[in-house]
Image (tube, coloured by chain):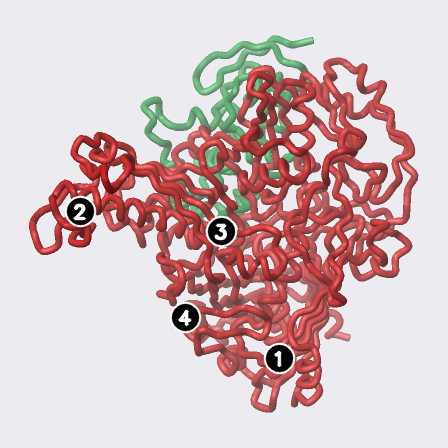
Amino acid sequence: MGIPLTLTVNGASVTREVEPSTLLGRFLRETLRLTGTHIGCDTTQCGACTVHVNGRAVKSCSMLAVQAAGAEITTIEGLAAKDGTLHPMQAAFRDCHGLQCGFCTPGMVMSAVDLVKNHNCSTEEQIRAGLDGNLCRCTGYHNIVKAVAQGAAAMK
Amino acid sequence: MNAPQAPFVGQSVTRREDARFLTGRGQYTDDIDLPGQTYGEFLRSPHAHARIKKLDTAAAAKAPGVLGIFTGEHFKQVGGLPCGWLINSLDGTPMKEPKHPVLADGKVRYVGDRVALVVAETRDQAEAAVLLIDVDYEELPAVVDAAKAAKAGASVHDEAPNNTCYQWGIGDKDGTDAALKSAAHVTTLSFRNNRLIPNAIEPRAANASYDVNADNYTLYVANQNPHVERLLMCAFVLGIPEHKMRVVAPDVGGGFGSKIYLYGEETALVFASKQIKRPIKWASSRSEAFLSDAHGRDHITTAKLGLDKDGKFVALRVDTTANLGAYLSTFASAIPTILYATLLAGQYKTPKIYCEVTAMFTNTTPVDAYRGAGRPEATYLLERIVETAAGELRLDPAEIRRRNFITEFPYASPVGLTYDTGDYNATLNKAIEVGDVAGYAKRKAATEAKGQKRGIGYSAYIEACGIAPSSVAGALGARAGLFEAGEVRVHPTGKVTVFTGSHSHGQGHETTFAQVVADRLGIGMDDVVIEHGDTGKVLFGMGTYGSRSIAVGGTAIVKALDKIIAKGKKIAAHLMEAADTDVVFEGGAFKVAGTDKAVPFAQVALTAYVPHNFPHDKLEPGLNENAFYDPSNFTYPAGTYICEVEVDTATGAVKIDRMTACDDFGNVINPMIVEGQVHGGLAQGLGQALLEHGVYDENTGQLLSGSYMDYAMPRADDFPTFNVETVKGTPCTHNPLGVKGCGEAGAIGSPPALINAICNALGVKDVPMPASPYNVWKAAQSLAR
């Protein structure tokens, strides 16, 4: 039996029926077809599915969709400005070559924005520790760390 | 960002693919939904080795939403998954090639082996129905360790006595053994090159459909070589006419080798899609990926290096046992042979080399190419034993290398390769400078003042890239040519679409290939689009692996561009009423040499498609050219890596304090992307040496490192900022771009540098990979006793 669920996603109010067992990540990908949020593991380790729930980074595989009732969700699709101007963190990832295959990137960018906004991360050590919950297999993290530092400076 | 200006080659142009990836608009296989789509889930073996006594699908078939269940019975009449390389044993007999069934045929041979495919309306329904399949297994003895496989009670395949696939050798055995006997000094080293699990962050996925009206198939699949996937599946397994099958590898979230192969999963989906007559999607979970993606490495090796009194190498003897897993994966047989033993000369003029490889079947996930594929194993062996020899002879590790470097090219090695060019002193000297080896003593003193130990380790690697010259590959047993194809389609307005058989899954080809094309045609990068990954668009392709894309795929494009320019010259000559031979092409225009007559590229393109004024007697209209390029040799990137570590001997914790990589990749198209490739390779190589380990339980054959909770993936805080320097190198002599390839270097060069550094810090001969705190602590304790 579905449960009615109303929440705000990327600024728009959304109402859908969901199964109680549906994870937020699956709900975003499959029900709302916001496929920028990626599923990379089944043990809440990789962080590819990170989104913002009420302004805080959350691994959307570790939360039921119904737990997000009434919440404001931002996914990677909602990060850039309405006119398409990239968020400073997105621009920093591009400029620093902080992505290769792009699969971890949405989660990485959403985590990075949270690290800067909510945790005031700016030094290399803070950024490396802060990204502990996001796996990347392509970049060796080198340029991701550079990108987050540059994005942090641009967000000030 | 300012738009880049020509010439584009050599510039760190930011990537055009990033816009979609950064905004969530990438289209990976699991992002693609098709109308009427169903879902597939696989039942996998819980046992390492068992006979299937009963397989009852009746209850599952009646479960809600189930549309079909497929088992080994459905695939009895089709072929097995083929292996592309034939290796002959020393006694001349061909390797043992037991059938690698699409779904298990009466027996399961590793934990995760595919037993059945369930297709249902929803994923949840498919998952639920999988649990209702009733299987009676008769458990059989299992073996997971290659060292024990020959004498194990388990027989993985009846066709392979002693679980041996082949016993192969290369080089001069008698000469090597004689030289070792008379050597002034012999260094011996035995070690295991640990099993790795690739872990591209995008798990494998596929979406297969059959069009009843057209009688053809479409397969979307996370794959590095869609044409090869199609060829193998059609010609060797399912017997589908190749022209009735389209394979699309859309955005792919990393490969590292694990997405080269034809797997049973997508093969079963394609077969089932015709029965179900609806699209079937499958997306691997990470747990499935650990069990079913081909693994890497897993060698056991003993090596002996003989040296004369001056520290010059006189001979190298290597004996390796390689674990192939339960079945032969697509490239499996080539990895511990052709891509391994041929690299054992490294950067050194060792006159005598002999290597013998025994390849074993075990009850583990198949082992195949993983970033570097054989070359990391060769480099690990060589750079560990060279550094060990230096320690034993009290020679500086840089000095022992200098005394043995190959300095004259071309150089024919005793193990079958001819290096065209290189300058190994240049990369060694640069690494010593960039890594500030001069300041090492001071840093060591500072570390010791903290009560810890510091060590430094070198590694001077070589790799063979641009796989592969078909003639060489054929002589070595490949059952395929490894050329590449490219097509340049000039549109009437002078805009250009390039189709390449290379596949980008993170490498940035859409940007780098466009840099090459724009420069060659003298047009803007915005005027060029690169298409790849779709057999319905691209004429042919061998795909991307072995650091081959720019060297082989890029060259195919250049060859097609040469044809475009040659035809353009004839059209321009007609327009300018000049002789063909007087026309030159420069700066985006065709010109009559020595005059001010010129026509721009776009005008020639328009003339080719609106040919009112056209040399119809000599030329066909249109401006579209194909090229196939088969390289005449491998390319040979090389470099020196230097690692410094701090070791806490009380806990065994290792901190990588400095990691320096100096590489010679020949000419570089986009330095930013090249450095990014090195960073990623370093993380995978250092991950192998420090963290990662695919571990099976000896008794049960269960994979113990089957999730991110157990398999130590490298994370951001495991590494320092890397010092990466690409030297102004020695361009490849046999391709027009002078490029060598850069994708695997980091993973090849870094493991021995790290282990050498730890051994140096502790003053021990060896520390096993991964150098976990426990392994390092044990090594430190052995010394204390």
What residue is pinned by disc 4?
A: B430
Indicate the amino acid at tag 2: Phe
**Left or right: B734 in relation to B118:** left
Cβ atoms under marks 1 and 3 closer than 8 Å = no
In this rendering, the label closer to the viewer, 3 or 4? 3
Q: Nearer the viewer, residue B165 or B7?
A: B165
Mark 1 and mark 2: Cα distance apart in space: 54 Å
What residue is pinned by disc 2?
A: B590
Cβ atoms under marks 4 and 2 closer than 8 Å = no
**Which residue, as the protein is rendered here, is positioned at the far left?**
B596
Cβ atoms under marks 3 and 4 closer than 8 Å = no
Residue B99 image position (x, y, % from top left): 76, 44
Q: Residue at x 58, y 64 (%)?
A: B754
What residue is pinned by disc 1?
A: B352
In this rendering, the answer to whether B748 lies above or below A38 is: below
Disc 1 sits on a residue from what chain? Answer: B
Q: Secondary structure at mark 1?
A: strand
Indicate the amino acid at tag 1: Lys
Examine the rendering and report whether any part of residue A115 can be seen: no
Cβ atoms under marks 2 and 3 closer than 8 Å = no
